[in-house]
Image (cartoon, helix red, strand yellow):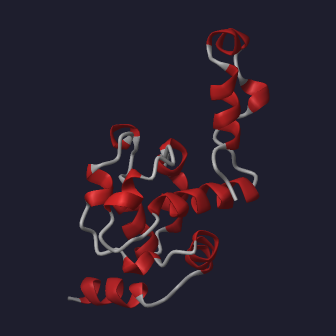
Amino acid sequence: MTKRLSSISRLSIKNPFTEFIEEMSGEKVYKCYQCGKCSAGCPLGSFMDHLPNMIMRLLQMGENEEVLASNTSWFCASCFMCDSRCPKGIRISAVMEAVRSYQLRQGKDRVDPGGLDAALLDDVPQQAIVANLRKLTL
């Protein structure tokens, strides 16, 4: 019972990270009621360590470090499938974009352009490399 009460009380307390995500994305993470439709339609869900609805729940619970350690926001293709499936109209892709933006502002990037292997640069289309470095960040 105590564990349940502590998790409920954490839901009502916003932290600076969640406030940043909500401000940057324009979405309220607490609107998500965990139906899972976003995750069921995600074409890259099998590559993510946390599905989109799990990221929303982690944000609701204030589990900032777990959200930031996750690869989900970096694998998000911004295809808007999750947005179109959400019955609450939450733009989950905008939330993922805000998580990426937060990490970039903290100096944490998923790809180091200087660290890319020269052989990889010859084999991968330049557009893919540029798209990966830019993503869709605010």
The number of discs equals 0
Q: Residue at x 49, y 57 (%)?
A: 93
Residue 11 higher or lower than 88, as above or below? below
Residue 50 visible, this orientation: yes
| Residue 40 coordinates in the image, percent (x, y) | 26, 51
Q: Which residue is drawn at 62% across and 77% down?
A: 23
Q: Residue 106: tell me if it is visible.
A: no
Q: Tell which residue pokes out farthest to the left in this image.
A: 1
Residue 63 location, x and y as percent? Answer: 46, 69
Q: Nearer the viewer, residue 5 or 30?
A: 30
Q: Whole-percent x and y of residue 22?
A: 56, 76
Q: Where is residue 126 in the image (x, y as percent from the top left)?
A: 70, 21
The residue lying at 39 percent from left, 37 percent from top is 47
Q: Residue furthest front?
A: 84
Image position of 56 with respect to 104: above or below: below
* 39 relative to 106 in the view: left or right: left
Q: In which quarter of the image is residue 135?
A: top right
**Residue 82 sits in which quadrant?**
bottom left
